[in-house]
Image: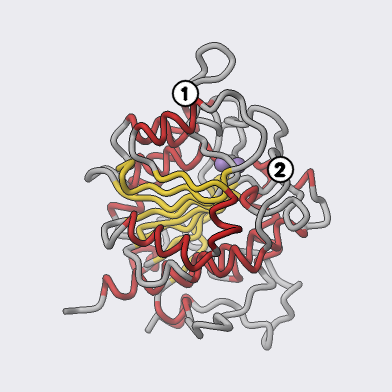
Amino acid sequence: MSDTAFQPVSGFDLPRYAGVPTFMRLPHITPEDPLYTSVDIGLVGVPWDGGTTNRPGARHGPRQLRDLSTMIRAVHPVSLTKPFELCNCADLGDVAPNPADLEATLDRTTNFYTQLKARNITPLTAGGDHLISLPILRGLASDGPIGMIHFDAHTDLFNEYFGGTRYTHGTPFRRAIEEGLLDPQRVIQIGIRGTMYDGEDIAFGRDNGVTILMIEDLMERGFADVMQQARDVVSNLPTYCSFDIDFLDPSFAPGTGTPEIGGPDTYTAQRCIREMRGLNLVGADLVEVSPPFDPSGGTAWVGASIMFELLCVLAESVAASKKPS
Ligand code: MN
Ligand code: MN
């Protein structure tokens, strides 16, 4: 049971449009706060899109995700999971980015997540473009490679762009495999689609043992079968979940830089995440929400709702790991 200091503001007490917007109306806690050492799950923003190769704007994601996340209530409607009672959850603020310095931002992000790991805080991150997953993994996988369930229209396994640039939002998982942060045998990618450059990314992934499922696998086999395969691939060892909002069909999530048609609906995404219950999860992120492409906030609302689904499975995993045996 979590500390009362970590309860979100209820819509019964203060209307959900009122107050300062933090992630899911949780307390904002900084490292100087005495409560910081009691945090189990930290919700973190990484407002940076310096890895974007085409249409930018994901740097504005965390702020709009915080705003729309005030719509989230406290209990999961199907599993009845109460993440804010299972774990001490808090909004830990943003990693301070440098919009003009890619390497400095990667280092700052790595340091932030190294600190979280040292304090046994499990992160749920809002991006930012997908390159932010690389420094997050550098912080979390310092003890050795981990597994990953990756929802995306793209593999993000490219080698380089523009004649030698190795760090973009199309390369994070290539680098993470090379750096020994991910065990490719325990990585599964779901939802891959869209026109291709040359297929070199998919060839690299499959040559290294990554399980790459095209969108046809999900649509034709269904979420239950595909997610059973995902559970088999990652096993009960430490696993990260990375969710690119462009996994979804652009009719549900148009506010993103690299949309691809022919994607799943929001219900399918929810069912996929619910099938992750009971896994050994060490963190998750939701990336590539780009508010300038959807000023209505609709995409951020979808993103915040996906974050709540991720939070519920994370909270169950964290609570199980902290239970005295
Ligand atoms: Mn991606
Ligand atoms: Mn993508």
Q: Look at the image and tell me whether residue 278 can be seen.
A: yes
**Residue 152 sits above or below residue 19 on the image:** above
Where does residue 129 sit, x and y in percent of width and height? 59, 40
Q: Position of residue 39 (x, y in %)?
A: 38, 67
Residue under the image location 35 percent in, 58 percent down = 282
List the single residue furthest toward the right.
296
Name the residue type under label 2.
Pro
Q: Position of residue 283 (x, y in %)?
A: 40, 57
Residue marked by disc 2? 259
In what quadrant of the picture does the C terminus appear?
bottom left
Q: Which mark is residue 159?
A: 1
Foreground pick, 89 / 181: 181
Q: Residue at x 50, y 53 (%)?
A: 285
Q: Type of residue at label 1?
A: Asn
Task: Say whether disc 2 or disc 1 marks the residue closer to the N-terminus.
Answer: 1
Res 126 seen here: no
Q: Secondary structure at mark 2?
A: loop
Q: What's the residue at 58%, 83% (across, down)? A: 77
